[in-house]
Image (cartoon, helix red, strand yellow):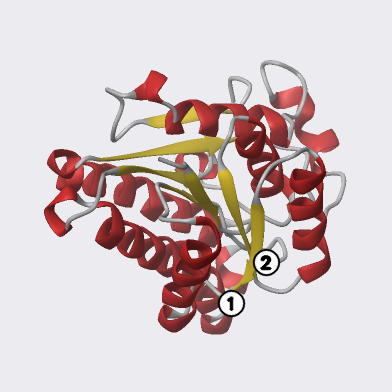
Amino acid sequence: MTRVVLITGGSRGIGAATARLAAFQGYAVGVNYRQDAEAAGEVVRDIERAGGRALAVQGDVGREEDVERLFEEVEAGLGRVTALVNNAGVLERQTRVDGMDAARLSRVLTTNVIGSFLCAGAAVRRMSTRRGGAGGVIVNVSSRAAVLGSPGEYVDYAASKGAVDTLTVGLAREVAAEGIRVCAVRPGIIETEIHALGGEPDRVTRLASGIPMERGGSPEEVARAILWLLSDEASYVTGALLDVGGGR
């Protein structure tokens, strides 16, 4: 059976690195994006140039109709989804909690929490042996921020990732007897564009001295952890939260 992985937010950063590594390991890859069609297309072209199969599909994970269409298009183009990487996530500019308004909170929680729930639910409906599926794996991309809280910067983002942790543990226990494993990775300070979106492109450099390994991580290092959790080598691992944070 062809292994098909759907990666939300797959056009850049950790998502793009995971897409490329998954293709290298033999997966057909659905690359979801919300806005940047060109970046998603470049990931697909890289995969195809290397002899793999991939498909870029636009969709907002916070919208139910987009999530259903996303799964349907990937399955029509590549085959039944056997793995989901819930990677799509957003943050806003650094500020304290007393500077946050409801509109900001809605944007962050809709993508990071509601999106993760909607995509996980769609995956379970297709993968669960109880529903006629053949099983599968879901890996949620959380963050060390869920533990550390991101004071003065992104407490809303950290709280959203705390919800992702809870989703991971609860869903893992809910579907363990239905052939589905559910795990999460919790990246620390990783060299991606997300820091610029928060208003501090050099954030990794500023924080590196406080990381026990004294450096930021790469998207590829997180991708390798995700692919291990997806693999049969992790066949008895579910409900696990794997920290990829250089000791921080």
Q: Quadrant of residue 25?
A: top right
Task: Give the amino acid at mark 1.
Answer: Arg
Judged left or right of residue 70, residue 93 is: right
- The quarter of the picture where the N terminus appears is top left
Q: CA distance from mark 1 to mark 2?
A: 7 Å
Horizontal and vertical percent for residue 9?
A: 62, 59
User: Contact, CB < 8 Å: mark 1 with mark 2?
Assistant: yes
Sequence-first disc among 1 and 2: 2
Task: Give the amino acid at mark 2.
Answer: Glu
- The residue at the point 46 percent across, 58 percent down is 160
List the single residue furthest toward the top.
Answer: 213
Q: Residues within 10 Å of mark 1 (few under 14, many from 20)?
A: some
Horizontal and vertical percent for residue 39?
A: 81, 60
Q: Residues within 10 Å of mark 2 (few under 14, many from 20)?
A: many
Q: Do we see residue 197 in this rendering?
A: no
Of residues 243 and 94, the one drawn nearer to the viewer in this rendering: 243
Q: Identify the residue position indicated by label 2 in the image.
A: 92
Judged left or right of residue 87, residue 67 is: left
Q: Which mark is residue 72?
A: none
Of residues 227 and 162, the one drawn nearer to the viewer in this rendering: 227
